[in-house]
Image (spheres, rainbow, N blue to C red):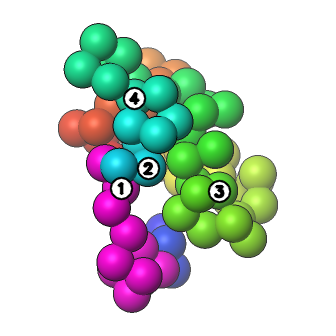
Amino acid sequence: MGDLRFYISSNNLDLVKILFNLGYTSENQELDFEAYYNFLKNVNPDIKKEEALYVFKETDTDNSNSISILEI
């Protein structure tokens, strides 16, 4: 996760813009794993699905099987 944070920071990525491009809206405020994986692939194209699943599980703090912007 530290590498991902470094990549985001060093590339000055706009995470909210990426989320909105993937369908995250004020009405749809959560991402399931597949949408989250697509989000991570936009952030870091080299990320593996297993790595994304690990980050998803660590980020899904309420164990809802979805990620909200508050958890990211």
Name the one closer to the observer, 28 or 54. 28
Disc 2 target residue: 18
Q: Residues within 10 Å of mark 2 (few under 14, many from 20)?
A: some
Q: CA distance from mark 4 to mark 1?
A: 11 Å
Q: Residue 17: image x %, image y %?
A: 35, 49
Extent of the magenta region: 5-16
Q: Earlier in the sequence, mark 3 or mark 2?
A: 2
Q: Is residue 2 above or below residue 1?
A: below
Membership of 53 in magenta stretch? no
What residue is at 44 percent from the left and 19 percent from the top?
A: 64
Disc 3 target residue: 41
Q: Can see residue 23?
A: yes
Three-letter code, disc 4: Tyr
Q: Can see residue 54?
A: no
Disc 1 target residue: 15
Q: CA distance from mark 3 to mark 2?
A: 10 Å
Q: Earlier in the sequence, mark 4 or mark 1?
A: 1
Disc 4 target residue: 24
What residue is at 34 percent from the left and 78 percent from the top?
A: 12
